[in-house]
Image (spheres, helix red, strand yellow):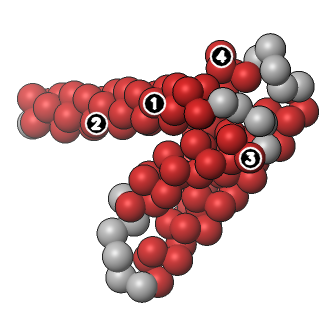
Amino acid sequence: MNILIFFIVLTAAIGGEFLTIYLSYLPVSSRSATQKQMLHTSFVVTAYSMMAGTLLGFVDLPRSLSFLVAAALVHFMGRRMLQQSHRQAWYSCLIFIGLALLAGLTFTCFMHTSAANECLAR
């Protein structure tokens, strides 16, 4: 049962990161890049940022640094693979940071609400 939960959480984490990266490219590059290019770029950035998180864990650095690596990769790969201008790449990077912070704050809010409900139930 624990293995199943692990794979569900892993799939949700990878899917959430992929969706966040894809949504950061969508409003900026929808006219200049094809859907296939944006999906491919999002997949590459997701894979590299997951590898960066794993490597950071191996060298005993905080895995939260992988968020900064992912933001830098969104900018770099947007310029390289999607042929974005400098300004478009920065907009994609800022959208990614905003979506990631929104998802993190939402998750934190749900966790605190759940903990508060458990305390009230006792």
Residue 80 is labelled as 3
Residue 55 is situated, as x and y percent measured from the top left of the image, at 52, 77
Q: Taking the image as drawn, is residue 8 in sight?
A: no
- State which tag comes first along the sequence, 2 or 1: 1
Residue 113 is situated, as x and y percent measured from the top left of the image, at 22, 28
The local crowd at label 1, few if under 14, some if 14 to 19, many if 20 or more residues have their Cα within 10 Å, is: some
Residue located beneath label 2 in the image: 108
Contact? badges 4 and 3 (CB < 8 Å): no
- Describe the element under mark 1 as helix, strand or loop: helix
Residue 10 sits above or below residue 17 on the image: below
- State which tag comes first along the sequence, 1 or 3: 3
- State which tag comes first along the sequence, 3 or 2: 3
Q: Residue at x 77, y 36 (%)?
A: 83
Q: Quadrant of the C terminus?
A: top left
**In this rendering, would 36 be left or right of 29?**
right
Residue 27 is labelled as 4
